[in-house]
Image (cartoon, rainbow, N blue to C red):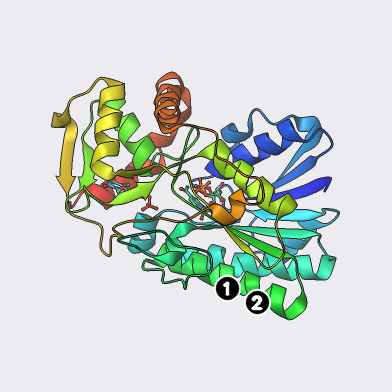
Amino acid sequence: MNRILVTGGAGFIGSAFVRYQLAQYPDVHIVTMDKLTYAGNLDNLREADPARHTFVKGDIADAAAVAGAMSGCDAVVNFAAETHVDRSILGASEFLRTNVDGVYNIVEAAKKQGLERVLLVSTDEVYGSIDVGSFKESDPITPRNPYSAAKAGGELLGRSYHTTFGVPVIITRGSNTYGPYQYPEKVLPLFVTNAIDQEPLPLYRGGEHNVRDWLYVDDHCSGIDVALRNGVPGEIYNVAGGNERENIQLTRRILELTGRDESLIKLVADRPGHDRRYSIDPAKLKALGWEPQMPWDEGIAQTVRWYQQNEWWWRKIKSGEFKEYYLRQYGQR
Ligand code: NAD
Ligand code: TYD
């Protein structure tokens, strides 16, 4: 695997994966294809060595663009997606276009070009909520919001291309990911950057005790890499951090680390259809040799420090399109 197409590589996890591949594999060349939506950002790729990295601006919903970027590649890893649940509640059409039609173009081009591996990055959210225990890959999927339903649609299509045409599709389902360069609409960077600015933290009322399992971004990338290189085509692999926290615990930790007090917490109207708890069992991926490396206490402290030290990165984001979204999302709450 010498030339890998990374779609959505200018986003949060995709850009970390590009850095990870370039650092781990001296012979690999990465082609990043990204539409540069509101969430895509070339600043995220500033550390990628241009001698081993090519950037192509393009939309995965454009079949010809996908086929062109894939030409000459051995493998594709798809991160490109509309990714924010709250935005999918405000309007889902872009979610279907990218997360379903876009994935169709990727598997179709991979079929025609005979790629060695097609890795579709998916999410634990496709399983839906679970009160007790953890989902395994063999459990049925019951996505409950437009984002996760669209991700499930893309996954199912990908799997059908393996069954029907023998396209070597592998799927990973990751848990909530955190780290540097995460667009500040997601709860962790939103709360950290709001806390730095002494702005309210909009915690969903009724969702204070909802649970997410936090996975450090580099551990997510190494999990995807292990599945890509050692995984079996047609199989699905859960990637989980093993750090389950209630939202209120996460919020308090962020306040402690930023030196702010609880008066900043503002309970706002809950998310419709808010999934109570996500939990997945990563034993199948661990059997391939994967182990997450980042302890929670260190990961959260390092991540908060990164946002404190990299205001240049998030201040320009929060002053652009973000402001309009923030008002639309939280103005009525
Ligand atoms: P992100 O929103 O930060 O980045 C998404 C990237 O995809 C952006 O660079 C954007 O410009 C690009 N993109 C969007 N539509 C596109 C299109 N039509 N064509 C080409 N590029 C397009 O997302 P992220 O958090 O990095 O998530 C990456 C992947 O990981 C997604 O598939 C997501 O479903 C999955 N995932 C995310 C998490 C998480 O906690 N963030 C957890 C599990 C799985
Ligand atoms: P989010 O980061 O949107 O990830 P996901 O919904 O994909 O898990 O949200 C994580 C948790 O934080 C979720 O339970 C919803 C909650 N949340 C808030 O309480 N307030 C917010 O402003 C946001 C964005 C999320």
* Mark carried by residue 160: 2
Q: Residues within 10 Å of mark 1 (few under 14, many from 20)?
A: some
Please state which of residues 50 and 218 is positioned toward the viewer in this rendering. Answer: 218
On the image, the x and y values in percent for residue 182 come to: 47, 38
Q: CA distance from mark 2 to mark 1?
A: 6 Å
Is 84 positioned to the left or the right of 35 in the image? left
Residues at circles 2 and 1 in contact by the CB criterion of under 8 Å: yes
What type is the residue that disc 1 sits on?
Leu
Q: Quadrant of residue 274?
A: bottom left
Q: Residue at the left extreme?
A: 263
Residue 300 vs 11, above or below: the answer is: above
Residue 99 vs 195, above or below: the answer is: below
Residue located 58% across and 41% down the image: 291
Q: Which residue is mark 1?
A: 156
Does residue 8 show up? no
On the image, the x and y values in percent for residue 317 come to: 43, 35
Please state which of residues 39 and 242 is positioned toward the viewer in this rendering. Answer: 242
On the image, the x and y values in percent for residue 265 come to: 18, 36
Is 244 positioned to the left or the right of 241 in the image? left
